[in-house]
Image (tube, grey):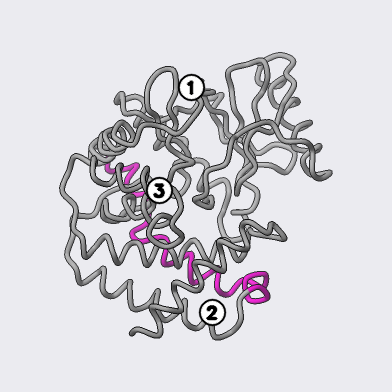
Amino acid sequence: MTDAAPTDAVASPLATDADAELLAACAALARQLGLGETAPQIVGRFSNRAVWLAPRPVVARVPTGTTAVRDASVFARRECALAGALAAQGAPAIAPLADPLAGPHAFSGWTISLWQRADVQPGLPDPAESARALAACHAALRTVPAALQARFVRWQPFDEIERLLGHPAVRARLAAPDRALLAQQATDLRVQLAQNVAPLQLLHGDAHLNNALATAQGMRWHDWEDAFIGPVEWDLACVVAGARVLGSHVAWSEALLAAYPAPWDAERLARCIHARTLFTVAWMALLAGDDAEKLARLQGRLRWLRSLGKAA
């Protein structure tokens, strides 16, 4: 789970001792797996660390913030299996390395999976191409073998909202009235969405701008950790929720929605935008730390949710 404000994925300076330990672990794992000597560099610092094993065309993904409410090994195994299955079908998804290199590997206290490094092009990805690639992924997800589909949960975000609202860090960040509002809105939306009959299928689960990559090989969607079973409107809500709620990247988001080449339901989309915003607020309350920009976005989303509560 990442926040939906685009951030350049560039090498970051070491921020903590844990970063230094992680980079050392990645270098040691690369040697153990026969990848030779590498100079790991952090290239993404979201709810996971993304570490380029330079000069190899390999990126290590390492869960960090999400481990507060998720079993890192379970989610990483599912993610590798799903992305591998999609790539094998030719779907526009970033692929893990071939087994057994992909992992995930339990190493020095970390859960590390290894992925192909994409040659990402500068600038925003084309929204129409992103829409077509997302639709192609949705089509491929409908054909994933039943045994793999069975490893994913229906409407997982609602389960996580409940767990997050009970987490001590979230309870400290959010006032009791806000926690109660989020819990009630999540309960109501879960019922409403269950009653609004829709085809359910495997989804990306976190299909926002940061996860749409324009590469030298074409559009690719990555970061499949949040995959779950629900309606395609959830992924479309991930695309446009930031635009509708915060006014961020409106043109890109709305252009992707307009270009999505398959039917979707406007009422279901509106409810998924609401639910996605609840989900994002719960996660940001855990992960925002002292980051002023993230805290400002958190407060913006909270104001939007409060306004819906007053209107109800």
Residue 126 percent across, percent down from the top left: 36, 32
Q: Are marks 1 and 3 in contact (CB under 8 Å)?
A: no
Q: Locate residue 162 relative to residue 155 in the image: left or right.
A: right
Nearest the eye: 12 or 195? 12
- Other residues around mark 2 within 10 Å, as few (<14) / some (14–19) / many (≥20): some
> Which residue is located at x 75 percent, y 26 percent?
28
Q: Amino acid at mark 3?
A: Ala
Q: Tell me residue 256's x, y (percent).
A: 30, 42
Residue matched to label 3: 227
Q: Amino acid at mark 2?
A: Arg
Q: Is residue 91 left or right of residue 180?
A: left
Whole-number angstrom distance, CA of label 2 to CA of label 3: 25 Å
Q: Position of residue 257 (x, y in %)?
A: 27, 46
Q: For the C terminus, give its image quadrant.
A: bottom left
Q: Earlier in the sequence, mark 2 or mark 3?
A: 2
How far across and down, in percent of the image, does residue 144 sit?
Answer: 28, 38
Labels 1, 2: front one: 2
Q: Residues within 10 Å of mark 3 (few under 14, many from 20)?
A: many
Nearer to the camera, 58 or 42:
42
Q: Which residue is mark 2?
A: 179
Amino acid of disc 1 = Ala
Q: Earlier in the sequence, mark 1 or mark 3?
A: 1
Q: What residue sits right under mark 1 in the picture?
A: 98
Residue sitting at x 58%, y 18%: 57
- The residues colored magenta run 145-173
Of badges 2 and 3, nearer the viewer stands 2
Q: As displayed, is residue 291 above or below residue 128? A: below
